[in-house]
Structure formats: structure tokens, C-alpha cells
Amino acid sequence: MDSKKVRTRFAPSPTGYMHIGNLRTALYAYLIAKKNGGDFILRIEDTDQTRYVEGAVELIYRTLKRTGLLWDEGPDVGGPCGPYIQSQRMGMFREYAQKLIDSGHAYYCFCDKERLEEVRKIQEASRIPPMYDRHCRNLSPEEVKAKLDAGVPYVIRQKIPLEGTTTFHDELYGDITVENSTLDDQILIKADGMPTYNFANVVDDHTMGITHVVRGNEYLSSTPKYNLLYEAFGWEPPIYIHVEHIMKNSKEKLSKRNGDASFEDLIEKGFLTEAVLNYIALLGWSPKGENEIFSLDELIKEFDIDGLSKSPAIFDPVKLRAINAEYIRRLPPEKFLEYAEPYIRQSVKREDVNIRIIAETLQPRTEIFTEIPEQVDFIDALPEYSTELYRNKKMKTDEATSLIALKEVLPVMQALDDWSIDGIHAKLFELVEKLGVKNGYVLWPVRVALSGKERTPGGAIEIAAILGKEESLKRINKGIELLSK
């Protein structure tokens, strides 16, 4: 393995869904690797079996593949640093913990839960920040051996220096220095022999040659302890990039528990994968130019750590919709039809309508696909509607003028042989010119009569072409009948 090659990792826990923040972490790690000609590694951190959800690993694979964040090494593709599933790496963690004990950087702790709880209560009563009181830190080798021989349960703790400071560098926050006296002697190996997240992370990142670690800034407070572990082993720490949270608003983080959208939720709501990924990239990163629409390949070229923000990103559904709408407008017509047809068919069961015309009409007006069924639900059957819909101040229409317009339109449409968008357009605009009125005077009543709705994906001409001649004439007659009452 080339020690100079950039290597990043995405290390999710299989907890059942892909949070937007998790996907953004994966994206940034991927972009840093690919921008620098490096490797992107997938590692599954499944040691916390209490949170494990069946099928979650497959969901992680599926999401990353769908978004194009393909990994160079991982559980399913292998690589020189495997295994890439943490639960399959258990033997090595105990060995590394023993090295720390031997070098004086870790120790056995035999305190039981009752004692630890009592210490915590005393500290809380004294308003001392709760942390381990280091009761077992200075046990003699003989005392330790006696307890081990007696089978007394234990954990292995990191031996944090009692004095001095620890400094680490973060690419966003610069140099951060903390007093060692404020750091807890954290557990490295739990009583069941399993490594803690913090310890396994350090060992895995080093043994996999990870050069850049991208993670949420909630880990800033743990990083001094990580660096002390690197120092104790004589390893070079990685480059840290701690990114800010994605917020629902100025006070609340995005949270699945609060019903906030995961990646799968957004796809189910009708957003395009490429649009979601593009938007997530902008949650905490600012491109240098004015453009905000980027393919994944373009993101690789444009992405720069310098563009990352130290301020929380607010998840803006309106902006996501706008980006999604732009992606939809840019789709080739055939691709849009492929995406849109299942949504159209939720409302349109008729086989005699032209789905292609419906799609062409919808594409420039669609922001998310799940809104399509409601937009086209008038095609199979004209809904009941009030004649108040014919009133439109902007078009200067009301029930009386609309009745006149529809009566003028009916014979023109009955005589029309070329029932295409061009043919319908030509005849209706001939009528507009003949009557000496504005376009809306004719087109608004026709659109209402054909759809029974105030808002439709297209105008009168497109709707008539979609419905066909027989159905269109039937609905215009119905409009005349309603307005004549």
C-alpha cells in the first residue's frame, strides 16, 4: 500500500436507514479521495449488536451504489486491509490493547457497576464533571495478577496523562488544545472483551492506512484521546475534517426519531437520486462560482475542503425541490417518461390517452414525481366542479363570458380533423383572432371545462390533445350545460 496515497473511509453502523448526515459524510469522504486520486474504503462498524437491524448492511450497499459512491475496498469487494466488517476483526483489538498495557499507556480496571455508580453520584452531588476516579490506575502488578487469576471481571482503560495538554489539528477548526486533566480514562476494551467504538476506530483507521477522517464535529471532544492513542502506539494521526451538523432549523438537528427524512424517504417522496446528492453536497460546502448544479464527476473536480463551513447547515426543503426541478427539466424526454409513467398510471388507467403527450406536458412543470398523480387525476374522469372556477380576474372571465366562449369553441372543435397539439392550437387561435379577444378569454374556459380544476400541468391545448376529440367535446358540452343552469 502506498503510504502517500490518500485513503478515506465511510464507516457506518447498520442501524436500519441512511441518515442525510451519514450520506453527506460518505460523499465528502468519497470526494476527498477521488479529488486526490485516492481510495475510498467502506467499513461496517457492527460491534454494537443492540442497535443492529437486519438488512441494514444491504441498505448501505444499495444506497451507496445508487448514489454512485462506489468503494475501492470493502466487505463485498475485498482489499488488502480486510476484513472490512468490524465484528470480524475482534482478535486484533485485544492484542493492541495489551501493547498499551505493556507500554504503560493502558491498565486493567476491576471496578464494578455499583462502585462506579456510587462515584458518579458523589461527583454529581459535588458538581464535579462525572469521570472515572482512576481507582485502579496504580494497582501493583501483583494486585492485578491476583485479580486476574481470581477471575475478577475487568475492562481495559486508557491511561491519560494527568498533566500537560494535548493539541490536535483540524482542517476546519485549526489547532485545538485541551488540558489532559479534563480527559477521562476512557474504556478501550469492555468487560465482554469487545472494543469500544473509540478504540476500534483508531486501530482500524491506522491498520487500513486511512489518511483523512471525515466525521461530525460531535467527535471533536474525543479527538484528543484518539491522538494520545496514536502517540502511544507511535503512529501518525490522520488529517481530521470535523463537519458541522445538518439542522432542521436554528435549534433542532435533523433526526429520524423526529420524523425527518432519510435518503430512502426522499427517494420515495419523488426526488431524483442525483438531485438529492447534489443538494447534500451543498449542506455545509460552498462552491467557488455561482453554479450549484453538479454531477458527481463535476463535484469531484469542484470540491475543496476550503469550501466547508464551520456553521451548521439548515436543511431547506424548498431549495431541494428547486434543485430537483432543475434536474427533472434537464432529463432527456425518454428518461422523464420512464420515471414519470408509474406515477401517471396511478391516476390514469385509460389506455386510449397519449402518455407521451402527458409526459411532455408534465416535464417543465414537475418538481417532484409524487405530485404527478394529483396533477393528472382529471384525465380518466371529469371531477365535480363549481362554475366559480370560470371566474378569473386576470383573464377577465366569468360564468357569462365563459358560456359565450365555449359556445363559440364547440363547433370549431367539432369540425377539426387534425386533432393534434398543432391542429388544436391553430384553430383556437384563429377563433381568438376572429373574436378580437385576448387568448385567456377563450383558453381559460376551455381548460376549466376539460379539467374541472384550477391548476393543471398543461393548458387547454395540451389537455385537449391528451383527452382526445370525443372526450374533449363531451366535456365542453358538460361545461356549457353547467353554465347554462
Image: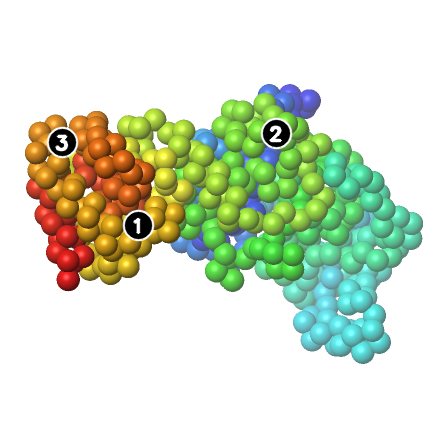
- What's the residue type where badge 3 is placed? Trp
Residue at x-position 32% and y-position 38%:
438
Disc nearer the start of the sequence (2/1): 2
Q: Are marks 2 and 1 in contact (CB under 8 Å)?
A: no
Q: Residue at x 48, y 41 (%)?
A: 322
Going from N to C along the chain, the mark reached first, 3 or 1, is 1
Spatial CA span between label 2 and label 3: 45 Å
Disc 3 secondary structure class: loop
Mark 1 is surrounded, within 10 Å at the Cα level, by few (under 14), some (14 to 19) or many (20 or more) other residues, namely many
Q: Please, what is the three-letter code of the amino acid marked with disc 1?
A: Thr
Q: Are marks 3 and 1 in contact (CB under 8 Å)?
A: no
The mark total stands at: 3
Please, what secondary structure does the residue beneath circle 1 have?
A: loop
Q: Which mark is residue 69?
A: none
x and y, in percent, of residue 148 in the image: 70, 61
- In the rendered image, residue 219, in percent from the top left (x then y), is placed at 69, 50
In the orientation shown, which residue stands out farthest toward the right? 164
Residue located beneath label 1 in the image: 397
